Amino acid sequence: MESTARYTPEMRERALRMLAEALPDHPNLTSATRHVAGLLGMSPETLRLWQRQMEANAGGKVANASEAAAEIKRLKRENAELRKANEILKATSVFFAKELDRP
């Protein structure tokens, strides 16, 4: 008995692309998988299996992409903290410059 494919290859590619795009916005792969699967009306397990198969076929490129996404997220957080610190330092320097100008 021959089984019929429920999803087209195009649907599979689209789902995997959406998953890759959603990874930076989620704390982990499971959360991103559930989100994308919910949007597409499919089982998260199906999407997870597709992702694992793609990762195995690509030699771990997806794992590296998720690591890169985590690094980008960390760097954005660090950048925001540095911007806040820079604003505080600017305000402090203005305050002390005014103090030096007083007679």
Image: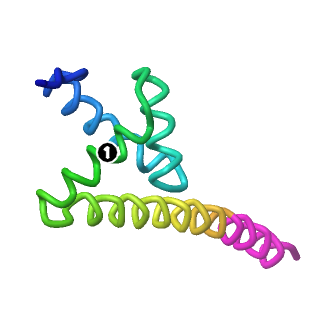
Q: Residue at x 18, y 60 (%)?
A: 56
66 or 71: which is nearer to us?
66
Q: Element at badge 1?
A: helix
Quarter assignment of residue 1: top left
Lateral position of residue 80 relative to residue 59, left or right: right
Establish if 62 lies above or below 46. below
Place of residue 43 in the rendered image (x, y in percent of width and height, measured from the top left): 43, 32
Dot 1 alpha-carbon crowd within 10 angstroms: few under 14, some 14 to 19, many 20 or more: some
Q: Residue at x 28, y 48 (%)?
A: 51
| Outermost residue to the right | 103
Place of residue 42 in the rendered image (x, y in percent of width and height, measured from the top left): 41, 26
Where are the magenta residues, as a range?
Answer: 88-103
Say whether residue 102 is magenta.
yes
Place of residue 65 in the rendered image (x, y in percent of width and height, measured from the top left): 28, 59
Establish if 58 lies above or below 96. above
14 or 52: which is nearer to us?
52
Q: Where does label 1 land, which residue?
A: 20
Establish if 62 lies above or below 92. above
24 or 33: which is nearer to us?
33
Q: Residue at x 36, y 46 (%)?
A: 48
Quarter assignment of residue 33: top left
Say whether residue 6 is magenta.
no
Lateral position of residue 93 relative to residue 38, left or right: right
